[in-house]
Amino acid sequence: MINDPIVETALKDCIFKYGPAAYVERTLSEKTIGFSSLDDFNDPYESDYRIVHYFHTLEDEKELLDPPVSALTNLQQLIKDYLKTIRVTCFSRTPTNNLMWSHYSAQHSGVCYAFERTQSNHPFDAEKMTWGNVVYASLL
């Protein structure tokens, strides 16, 4: 919680990126932030996928992939190759999330950058970026 109403108002249209202090100079001088490969995420299941994600049911998957072994292998390799080309960076809606400070800011010793979402000359190429909320789900 931010106890200063002026600061709180200034930050209400911002998104936040947590990081270690070691990268502050590079981030500010080069105006860059880190993007990670899905393979580099700290949660091994965060970028996990199953082929069934691309079909309604496992039965649909089996029906659509014929012969199943070679088609399935080819599809799995195609998806793995595609996922290797994706880079991701994550933001938060708040600069006061204790878990984010712990995990991404070198055990609370790092920084939290604020980016205005409504800035007209946004530093990110909107045509190459997608924005959205993280949706956590489990498959049973």
Image (cartoon, helix red, strand yellow):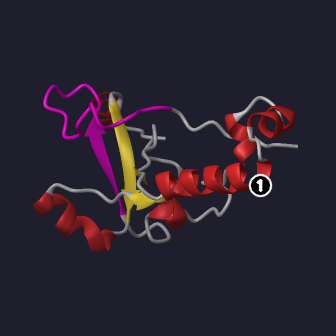
Q: Which residues are magenta?
A: 111-132
Label 1 Cα neighbours within 10 Å, binned few <14 / some 14-19 / many ≥20: few
Q: In the rendered image, which quarter is residue 123 located in?
A: top left
**Residue beneath label 1, please?**
69
Residue 126 appearing in the image: yes
Residue 98 place in picture, x, y as percent = 55, 55
Query: Which of the two residues, 43 or 8, is positioned nearer the viewer here?
Result: 43
Callout count: 1
Q: In the rendered image, which quarter is residue 14 located in?
A: top left
Identify the residue shown where x is 48% and y is 32%: 132
Q: Reply yes or no: does residue 135 show up in magenta.
A: no
Residue 105 place in picture, x, y as percent = 43, 65
State whether the magenta stretch is mostly helix, strand or loop: loop
Identify the residue shown where x is 67% and y is 36%: 54
Residue 108 place in picture, x, y as percent = 46, 66
Residue 46 appearing in the image: no
Q: In the rendered image, which quarter is residue 29 located in?
A: bottom left
In the shown orientation, is residue 91 left or right of residue 63?
Answer: left
Q: Quadrant of the C terminus?
A: top right
Identify the residue shown where x is 19% and y is 28%: 119
Q: Which residue is outermost to the bottom?
A: 22
Query: Which of the two residues, 112 or 133, is positioned nearer the viewer here?
Result: 133
Q: Reply yes or no: does residue 123 show up in magenta.
A: yes
Query: Which of the two residues, 77 or 135, is positioned nearer the viewer here?
Result: 77
Above or below, comparing residue 121 to residue 103 in the picture: above
| SS at badge 1 | helix
In the shown orientation, is residue 58 left or right of residue 33?
Answer: right
Q: Amino acid at mark 1?
A: Val
Identify the residue shown where x is 29% and y is 30%: 117
In the shown orientation, is residue 138 left or right of residue 78?
Answer: right
